[in-house]
Image (cartoon, rainbow, N blue to C red):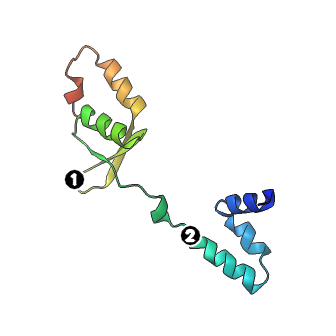
């Protein structure tokens, strides 16, 4: 396996237009088409995770932690994204209200 082959395979997914521009024969174009079928957006997707406005800080943190996410979209009752909350914002909220022992039950 040559370094060029490895680099081409890696960068193919990042800059596919570079590979299309240099393909001049049908065999190369068919090989390119086969490679494009390997990965789809669905292959890279994870199950959706969100928090609704009004849910507790505890729930938001738990979902982030369980799913290994740095933040979550905040959705309304129709599941339209109305915001985003991340771990840093949750931490800031906890520090601002540190005198409140039940902060984890505080709604977002």
Query: Where is residue 6 drawn, in percent x and y?
Result: 73, 58
In the rendered structure, the answer to whether residue 90 lies left or right of residue 76 reads right
Q: Is residue 42 visible?
A: yes
Quadrant of the rendered image containing residue 7: bottom right
Query: Where is residue 11 drawn, in percent x and y?
Result: 70, 59
- Hey, which residue is sitting farthest top in the picture? 99
Question: Which comes before the other along the chain, label 1 or label 2?
Answer: 2
Q: Which mark is residue 85?
A: none
Given residues 37 and 97, the one toward you in this image is 37
- Using the image, determine if residue 75 lies above or below residue 18: above
Which residue is label 2 attached to? 38
Helix, strand or loop at label 1? It is loop
The residue shown at (77%, 77%) is: 23
Q: Are marks 1 and 2 in contact (CB under 8 Å)?
A: no
| Quadrant containing the N terminus in the rendered view | bottom right
Q: Is residue 108 visible?
A: no
Given residues 6 and 92, the one toward you in this image is 6
| Quadrant containing the C terminus in the rendered view | top left
- Using the image, determine if residue 3 lies above or below residue 56: below
- Using the image, determine if residue 33 lies above or below residue 59: below
Graded by Cα atoms within 10 Å as few (under 14), some (14 to 19) or many (20 or more), the crowding at tag 1 reads few
How far apart marks 1 and 2 lie (CA) works out to 36 Å
Quadrant of the rendered image containing residue 105: top left
In the rendered structure, the answer to whether residue 9 lies left or right of residue 103 reads right
Which residue is label 1 attached to? 77
Query: Where is residue 101 drawn, in percent x and y?
Result: 21, 17
């Amino acid at each position: 396996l040559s370094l060029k082959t490895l680099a081409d395979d890696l960068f193919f997914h990042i800059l596919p237009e570079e590979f299309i521009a240099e393909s001049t024969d049908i065999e190369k174009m068919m090989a390119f088409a086969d490679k494009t079928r390997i990965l789809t957006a669905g292959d890279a997707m994870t199950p959706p995770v969100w928090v609704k406005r009004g849910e507790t800080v505890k729930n938001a943190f738990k979902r982030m932690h369980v799913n290994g996410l740095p933040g979550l979209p905040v959705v309304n009752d129709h599941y339209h994204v109305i915001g985003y909350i991340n771990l840093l914002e949750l931490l800031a909220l906890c520090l601002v209200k540190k005198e409140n022992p039940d902060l984890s039950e505080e709604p977002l």
